[in-house]
Image (spheres, rainbow, N blue to C red):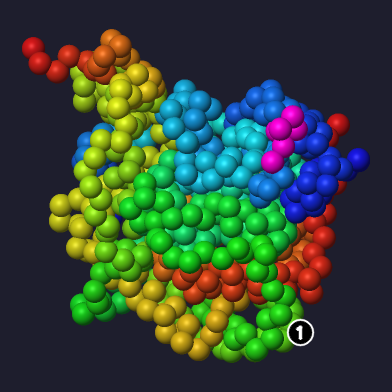
Amino acid sequence: MSNITTQSLTSLVDNIKNKELSSEEVTKAFIDRSEKSKELNSYISEDFSNAIDKARRFDQNPNFDLKLPGIPMAVKDLFCTENVRTTAGSKILENFVPTYESTVTQNIWNEGAILLGKLNCDEFAMGSSNETSYYGNVQNPIDKGLVPGGSSGGSAAAVSGQLTPITIGTDTGGSIRQPASFTGTVGLKPTYGSCSRYGIVAFASSLDQAGPMAQNVKDCALLQEVISTYDKKDSTSIDFKRNEYSKELNKDIRGKKIGIPKEYRVDGMPKEIEDLWQKGIQYAKDCGAEIIDISLPNTSYALPTYYIVAPAEASSNLARYDGVKYGFRAKGENLIDMYEKTRSEGFGAEVQRRIMIGTYVLSSGYYDAYYLKAQKVRKLIKNDFDEAYKQVDAILTPSTPSSAFKIGEKKDDPVSMYLNDIFTVPVNLAGLPGISIPAGHDAAGYPLGLQIIGKAFKEQEILDVAYAMEEKIDFKNKITDWWIK
Amino acid sequence: MTIDLKTIKHISKLSRISVDEQKAEKLAGDLNSIFEFIEKLNELKTDNVEPLTSVAETTLKFRSDDIKSENIRQQIIKNSPEDNEDFFVVPKVVE
């Protein structure tokens, strides 16, 4: 069967179950395409020969009752994978080989999937363009010289470029939804507490969530069903009734109330983003949804709040990289000198910047003015959503304030880079689920995404809205394979 | 508010990241533009607002304090940059 790599996850699963395709054929097809796609720099580590062995073993003794039978899959290099190097995009973890598996990846392998390799990302997931990775830029399959977004940039490029049928990323302030939007793919950030954080390299613990990144909504729902489990190993994992998201997908969203927050109409937003949003509103109406204007008055305070809370948590989480227990170590004259040189040489500029911000806002004399203040504003932002959800079932916004930008364009201006996440950050601060779906193209032909934000634990509801709108939008990604010689 | 070089040196010490003069100046510039952006929060009155510490509205669960993994010394030591098989090795700390 030709064109294996263009198939959706759902159709690959069907074809393996019907014995139209073997796991080995599918695995080899994705490996072959990945080998031809080195220029994208999507992978940090490849595990191809093990993947073929595992696929053969699956074919010899197949279990077709599994949800991901013999499906090859590459994952973001932020998930600890037993005996497979896990770098978090950092020099400091260049030689780190975990002795244990993250819960989310374990759930995936338990359903029959096979690891292809580890995908590039911004260092410790801190970035919006994949340019902070120690392992180099990732190219967006949409066009040469274009960022794939970040931090899950390698993941987004790998799905969009068909190097993996589906993948997982992590999202602390938009790191799944923004790259999904930049690459014409679907990305879901689940409710905080839906997916276990056990074994995920920590960035900001009160915001981090793992989630699926896929070619379409149905694939996304299927992977969410696999990765979302209650886990005792994560003290913030929540025991709630999870749906069989893919089986329960329902296109009928007639009568659903969808809110349009006026504060998301930000100054300087390009007209094509406004037009896309209007188109999205029309699609939702065409699906029978009721559109309601709402207000989220504290939206403009979300990014400043995020840039206190996330670095504060990061400075604490990253204190563990001291050159003693694991990771890179620089030579020092004494213990303190060793710590300071290890961290100065092992972390990249953006990570150091954020550790410094975090250290400062938590330091004596500044805690109340910054950290406590941010926690209070975070409460106001969450209250805004709670208030809005008394009137509506879901909220529709653009995913990003622009399409993908050029590599290097925003690298030297941290604040302009941070503004990328203006529409996604409030969702993390409030702990809500949000999904980005591709919804159109800009004048240059680059994809643009719409975001649907749901109530806590109502992943099914936003997946349903996304599923209904996806059919109306009928988006076609323009991938020319420019990088394949 | 401006963050001067002295403050940068202080934060660098607290965060155990060595910073030379050139890097300190670059960081001061970056941090000042970031804090200028963060200062926007001062527009908001928050005196009577409860700080939000966790979005998950559950209390932390208790678990029994049991040993779950035994004999994992080798696993723990495996990734250390320097060890003597049984212990992590660090530069001399006691004369």
Position of the N terminus of chain A by quadrant: top right
Could you tell me which residue is drawn at 60 percent across and 83 percent down? A258
The spot of residue A482 in percent (x, y) is: 83, 41
- Please give left or right for residue B46 compared with residue A134 in the image: left
The spot of residue A10 in percent (x, y) is: 75, 54
The spot of residue A172 in percent (x, y) is: 46, 55
Could you tell me which residue is drawn at 39 percent across and 74 percent down? A381
**Residue sitting at the far right:** A2
- Amino acid type at circle 1 is Asp
Give residue A337's quadrant in the image. top left
What SS does tag 1 mark? helix
Chain bearing mark 1:
A
Q: Which residue is mark 1?
A: A286
Give residue B62's quadrant in the image. bottom left
- Please give left or right for residue A410 compared with residue A482 in the image: left
Is residue A85 or residue A295 the one in the foreground?
A85
Q: Look at the picture and state if A354 lies above or below A48.
A: below
The spot of residue A47 in percent (x, y) is: 63, 27
Position of the C terminus of chain A by quadrant: top right
Give residue A288's quadrant in the image. bottom right
- Please give left or right for residue A105 compared with residue A222 in the image: left
Is residue A485 or residue A467 the one in the foreground?
A467
The region drawn magenta spans A58-63
Mark 1 surroundings within 10 Å by alpha-carbon count, few (fewer than 14), some (14 through 19), many (20 or more):
some
Per the image, is A322 magenta? no
Could you tell me which residue is drawn at 74 percent across and 69 percent down? A470
Q: Is residue A137 visible?
A: no
Could you tell me which residue is drawn at 24 percent across and 74 percent down? B50
